Image: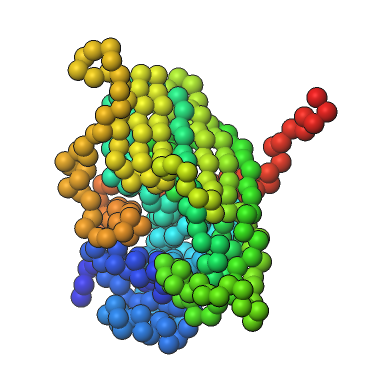
């Protein structure tokens, strides 16, 4: 009998298949996979050499008796399967968002704590190699006391991507759920995990999207954009969630005397004017990382060669960080492997670094609820 950690996957698309490969990378055994459509889940199970497949989650829990479950469906479909898994005594890995609102996320976190199961929440871009490098530099005092952080991203997503869960607030859609969660995780990992205050605004710049049949994989949805977007026979779905946001936050940092100010600016449908970036400003220098999720390269601004002259210099990735990068194509897939490796090792009783759990998943969802209220404006029109 295998003594590997046994995993049951919920979801057959890009995330479900990616989670399965990441758990295998961590040495776990995939004992089953569950999806909505019998023909699809059977084909995915065959392609991935998974022995058990089905459409009934509760039955799969009973049949497979997993140690841990992996939730890879849209956020609006997470609540009941996670509740069932926790009741069954399973540890839970969930992709983001944890749920579609703060109250249900908080409920799941409470249930997991009461049951004593381990959880992991996949706001996992904090594992980007250059983000790990930045964390090390800040801790070493390379920029002095952190003062503020600037996060700028413009995705310029195609407006005609087929209508799906990402367009629907009730299904866990929106850019706060699917971008801000990663950005907040990145910044807190470098500066400090305690979030003190937050405010923001959201905007839906999309309005509607074409309804197209046959889209089963989030990553390949662009392949289904209609060739003739003006075809009168096309049906349309209405977006009810944000595609752009501006958020301000304050974080507590062990490296700073005062709260660190953070600006998150994201335009989901706008053309990129310049490089997306993340910048950590400090009392003695700064760190600049290219890319909306910190893909790199990383530049350090500060005194060089012991003199007074300061300039931006590209920094090589430390050898130990480079050596620990999982060997897989794709940032998302690589970061799943980092986090899932920590969860599996923790389940096995090994010492691991702190990782994000349902505590953070619940907190982020409550933050998103506050940001979406958009009630922080002060009317100054009469001044």
Could you tell me residue 48's position as x and y percent? Answer: 29, 77
Could you tell me residue 30's position as x and y percent? Answer: 30, 72
How many numbered discs, if any? Answer: 0
Q: Which of 184 and 3 is in front in this view?
A: 184
Residue at far top of view: 308
Could you tell me residue 69's position as x and y percent? Answer: 39, 67
Could you tell me residue 45's position as x and y percent? Answer: 34, 81
Q: Which of 154 and 231 is in front in this view?
A: 231
Tell me, what colour scheme is on the image? rainbow
Q: Residue at x 26, y 47 (%)?
A: 351
Quadrant showing the C terminus: top right
Look at the image and tell me whether residue 75 can be seen: no
Residue at far bottom of view: 39
Q: In this image, 263 relative to 300: left or right?
A: right
Residue at far right of view: 382
Q: Which of 231 and 221 is in front in this view?
A: 231
Look at the image and tell me whether residue 242 can be seen: yes
Q: In this view, does 347 lie above or below 37?
A: above
Q: Which residue is drawn at 47% across and 41% down?
A: 152
Q: In this image, 307 relative to 220: left or right?
A: left
Quadrant showing the N terminus: bottom left
Q: Residue at x 42, y 77 (%)?
A: 34
Q: Which residue is drawn at 47% across and 57% down?
A: 96
Quarter location, residue 133:
top left
Q: In this view, does 352 lie above or below 198?
A: below
């Amino acid at each position: 009998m295998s003594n590997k950690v046994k995993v049951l996957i919920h979801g057959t698309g890009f995330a479900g298949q990616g989670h399965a490969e990441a758990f295998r990378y961590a040495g776990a055994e995939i004992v089953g996979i569950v999806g909505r459509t019998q023909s699809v889940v059977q084909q995915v199970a065959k392609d991935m050499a998974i022995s058990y497949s089905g459409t009934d989650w509760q039955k799969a829990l009973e049949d497979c008796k997993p140690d841990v479950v992996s939730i890879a469906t849209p956020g609006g479909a997470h609540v009941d399967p996670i509740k069932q898994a926790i009741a069954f005594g399973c540890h839970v890995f969930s992709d983001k968002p944890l749920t579609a609102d703060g109250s249900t996320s908080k409920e799941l976190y409470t249930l997991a704590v009461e049951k004593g199961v381990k959880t992991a929440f996949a706001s996992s871009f904090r594992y980007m190699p250059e983000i790990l490098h930045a964390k090390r530099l800040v801790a070493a005092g390379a920029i002095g006391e952190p003062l503020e952080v600037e996060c700028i991203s413009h995705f310029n997503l195609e407006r005609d991507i087929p209508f799906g869960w990402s367009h629907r607030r009730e299904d866990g859609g929106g850019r706060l759920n699917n971008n801000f969660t990663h950005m907040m995780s990145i910044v807190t990992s470098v500066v400090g995990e305690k979030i003190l205050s937050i405010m923001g605004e959201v905007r839906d710049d999309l309005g509607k999207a074409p309804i197209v049949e046959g889209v089963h994989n989030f990553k390949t949805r662009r392949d289904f954009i209609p060739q003739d977007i003006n075809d009168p026979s096309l049906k349309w779905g209405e977006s009810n969630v944000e595609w752009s946001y501006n958020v301000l936050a304050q974080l507590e940092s062990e490296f700073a005397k005062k709260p660190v100010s953070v600006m998150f600016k994201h335009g989901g449908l706008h053309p990129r004017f310049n490089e997306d970036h993340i910048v950590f400003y400090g009392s003695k220098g700064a760190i600049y990382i290219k890319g909306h999720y910190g893909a790199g390269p990383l530049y350090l601004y500060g005194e060089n060669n012991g003199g007074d002259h300061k300039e931006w210099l590209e920094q090589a990735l430390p050898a130990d960080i480079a050596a620990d990068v999982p060997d897989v194509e794709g940032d998302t897939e690589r970061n799943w492997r980092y986090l899932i490796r920590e969860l599996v090792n923790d389940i096995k009783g090994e010492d691991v670094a702190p990782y994000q759990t349902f505590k953070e998943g619940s907190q982020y969802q409550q933050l998103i609820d506050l940001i979406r209220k958009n009630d922080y404006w002060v009317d100054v029109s009469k001044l």
